[in-house]
Image (cartoon, rainbow, N blue to C red):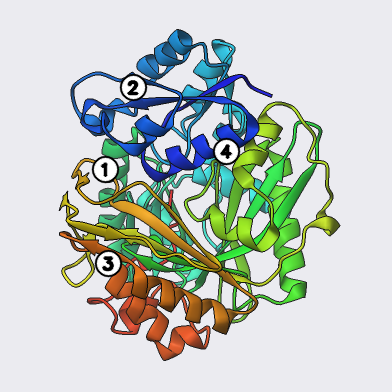
Amino acid sequence: MFAKVLIANRGEIAIRIIRACRELGIKSVAIYAEEDRDSLHVKYADEAYSLGAGNPAKAYLDIPRMVAAAAKSGADAIHPGYGFLSENPFFAAVCEAWKITFIGPTALAMQKIGEKAPARNRMIRLGVPVVPGTDRVVESPAEAREVAERIGYPVLVKATAGGGGRGIRVANAPEELVAALQKAGEEAGSLFGNAGVYIEKYLVAPRHIEFQVLADHHGHVVHLGERDSSIQRRRQKILEESPSPAMTPALRQEMGEAAVRVAKSVGYTNAGTVEFLLDNDGHYYFLEMNARIQVEHPITEVVTGIDIVREQFRLAAGEPLGYQQGEVELTGWAIECRINAEDPDNDFRPSPGRITDYREPGGPGVRVDGYAGRGYEVPAFYDSLLAKVIVWDRDRPRAIARMRRALGEYVVGGIKTTIPLHKRILDSADFRAGRTNTGFLESGGLVGSPSPLAGQVGER
């Protein structure tokens, strides 16, 4: 096991990793932009190093400074968390070159699974279902028109690089296709340095189902069941649950085995997530693989009893999994609500500012992963996530009741948050009946008008 680990991140995930370090007897090293000097992750860690002044968000993307901090501190491993550099194969390769263990997949595995068009082609060869479309980057408008006519409109034009709903356009008819190609390509080239796009059928309001996988360096891969991440805002997840209300034992086995094949096909190691779309007829399609820990990993932890972050350390250190697929059991039901500093009634406008009052919920079956408190100044530089409320109970109705109780106890004063929206979701008859999909918030009237891209784009 490692002696000292640098956490190349901030906020709640940095605190989560530091806690795992403490339990394993590992010294933790925090890094911080100057604006984060007084943040909790800096106070919790055994050591902390400044990334210097300048753009705060870019500080956490500065690979030379990250590696310099690791070298100065004597860290023998780096945990990237999620976001920032977590899925950057160059960062993983630099760590490898400096003999610093990257707690995640190899740079090669990340590259193999990272670009969407080649990944689709790989899935086709594996026999894993993909949404109908091209198996490579489209070369011309004529080729795009032929594909769109074959699979039928509406279609998505999607960037082969990047993610998070960027570099994507919908074409509902032939006359919209050329403009969609041009706009998606221009945006992709500007944001990701790769203007390549491909085409796939646009599925209307599917479910978003993801499977957590763990893989060691000895060829063993298991999945830890599914998470239903269908409830999304701006094409990013906001509420997740495990298991999924739509899942059957047979479908779980089939999709889980497909997720394991995906991981094995690229020589994947450590923790990752294989994401699928599930239509109303029970057909599933590969969407993408996220080569990192997920924001919503806690709900899998509480239904399986497996500490995924601790497993990341073990697997990165070369230890074998030590258990087989048949030994992984799902018990009870878990729900996670992301508490974001946003105004859900005003197009999810960010709500930075000082928190004037703060009280977290507690009691049986309630867990809060967060980093804010009374007096904390919520910055405008980063993602708006403040905390995650995770509840567990024996079945879904009890878990919903527990989450309603927990949200009723949660107080965040001085700023707007998504807590009121989560309360409306939990009170929705469709949610309580398990009738959710990627267009749920808009179609249920819980937020504004429907997004033309609700769902089928993934979250990176």
Q: Nearer the viewer, mark 1 or mark 3?
A: 1
Image quarter for residue 102? top right
> Which amino acid lies under the numbered mark 4 shown in the image of this protein?
Ala
Residue beneath disc 4: 20
> Which residue shows up at 53% across the image and 83% down it?
434
Q: Reading the chain from its start, which is encountered first: label 4 or label 1?
A: 4
| Residue sitting farthest toward the front | 363
Q: Mark 1 or mark 2, which is nearer the start of the sequence?
A: 2
Given residues 62 and 15, the one toward you in this image is 15
Q: Secondary structure at mark 3?
A: helix
Tell me where residue 205 sits by quadrant.
bottom left
Q: Residues within 10 Å of mark 2 (few under 14, many from 20)?
A: some
Task: Classify 95 as above or below 198.
Answer: above
Q: Amino acid at mark 2?
A: Asp
- Give the mark, 4 or 2, whose residue is nearer the N terminus: 4
> Disc 2 versus disc 1: distance between alpha carbons?
15 Å
Q: Can I make out residue 241 in this image?
A: no
Task: Determine whether the residue tagged by mark 1 lies in a helix, strand or loop.
Answer: loop
- In which quadrant of the rendered view does residue 226 lie? bottom right
Question: Please, is residue 40 above or below residue 342 in the view?
Answer: above
Where is residue 139? Give x, y as percent: 42, 44
Residue at image location 55% in from the left, 55% down from the top? 298
Q: Position of residue 284 (x, y in %)?
A: 62, 68
Read off the residue under disc 1.
382
Mark 3 lies on residue: 175
Label 4, label 1: how far apart the Cα atoms are: 24 Å
